[in-house]
Image: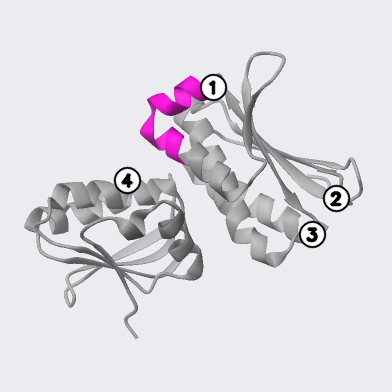
């Protein structure tokens, strides 16, 4: 984890694919956000969204590991949580995963489940840096 | 990490910690005898620092198992949980009450 914040700066944490580490992912996201100047009032929503995206990733590809990426762009902190092979159809097929994605979408207007060039999926959303 | 204590008055559980994917199963098991017995089940959540959708699903399943034989009462939810309950629509579900104890 690198710390000095500037435009284009990238941050990343890799964790075991184990539910016990979702709390670590939440802490990573909230402490990073606090450090780069995200409004304190956003931190609860951010922790919830990161947690849900991680839970969704684990629900499908458990064991492959958890990754949370973030970068600064246009005065926003952009979070990306890889979802492996689990696209939109997988989400609706599973109640828990569907609810997780729904929550992220409700919490952050720009939240999306996007497909990468290699065919895998990523949950992405961003929060304003004050 | 979630600590779960059984309370007799009112009958239910007192939670301390985080309810997420890692602790949802444990909460579900702790709720099971209360739900089986029926009657109102009170969850003191004042000390729950985080709850995610896996916690919400445990509550919904408990309500389903209760089948109207009692109410599920969430006691003193902190702001974050109150918000989660609202955005998931759980606050509009039948047989679920949110109460402030003090």
What secondary structure is the magenta-colored segment mainly? Answer: helix
Real-space Cα distance between discs 2 and 4? Answer: 39 Å
Residues rendered magenta in the picture: A88-99
Which residue lies at the image location 16% right of the left edge and 47% below the top edge? B65
Mark 3 → mark 1, Cα distance in angstroms: 32 Å
The tag on residue B25 is 4
Q: Secondary structure at mark 4?
A: helix
Give the class, few, some or many, for how many residues have Cα within 10 Å of label 1's Cα (few <14, many ≥20): some
Is disc 2 on the same chain as disc 1? yes
Calculate the distance from the C-alpha at mark 2 to the C-alpha at mark 3: 14 Å
Separation (CA) of disc 4 from disc 1 = 26 Å
Kind of element beneath mark 3 = helix
Side of A13 where B13 appears, left or right: left
2 or 3: tag closer to the N-terminus: 3
Q: Is residue A3 visible?
A: yes
Residues marked 2 and 4, same chain: no
Residue at mark 2: A75
**Residue A19 shown left or right of residue B94 in the figure:** right
Which is more N-terminal, label 2 or label 1? 2
Chain identifier of the residue bearing label 3 in the image: A
């Amino acid at each position: 984890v690198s710390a000095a914040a500037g435009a284009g700066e990238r941050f990343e944490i890799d964790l075991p694919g184990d539910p016990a580490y979702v709390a670590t992912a939440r802490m990573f996201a909230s402490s990073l956000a606090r450090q780069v100047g995200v409004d304190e009032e956003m931190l609860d929503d951010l922790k919830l969204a990161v947690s849900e995206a991680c839970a969704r990733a684990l629900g499908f590809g458990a064991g492959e590991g958890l990754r949370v990426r973030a970068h600064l762009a246009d005065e926003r902190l952009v979070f990306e949580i890889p979802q492996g092979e689990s696209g939109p159809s997988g989400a609706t097929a599973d109640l828990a995963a569907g609810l997780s994605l729904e929550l992220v979408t409700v919490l952050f207007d720009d939240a999306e489940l996007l497909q990468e060039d290699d065919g895998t999926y990523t949950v992405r959303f961003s929060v304003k840096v004050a | 990490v979630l600590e779960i204590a059984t309370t007799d008055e009112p009958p239910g559980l007192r939670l301390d910690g985080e309810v997420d994917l890692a602790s949802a199963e444990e909460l579900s098991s702790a709720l099971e005898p209360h739900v089986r017995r029926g009657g109102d089940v009170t969850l003191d959540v004042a000390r729950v620092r985080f709850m995610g959708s896996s916690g919400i699903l445990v509550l919904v399943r408990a309500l389903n198992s209760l089948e109207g034989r009692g109410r599920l009462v969430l006691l003193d939810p902190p702001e974050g949980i109150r918000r989660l309950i609202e955005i998931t629509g759980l606050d509009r579900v039948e047989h679920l009450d949110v109460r402030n104890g003090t």
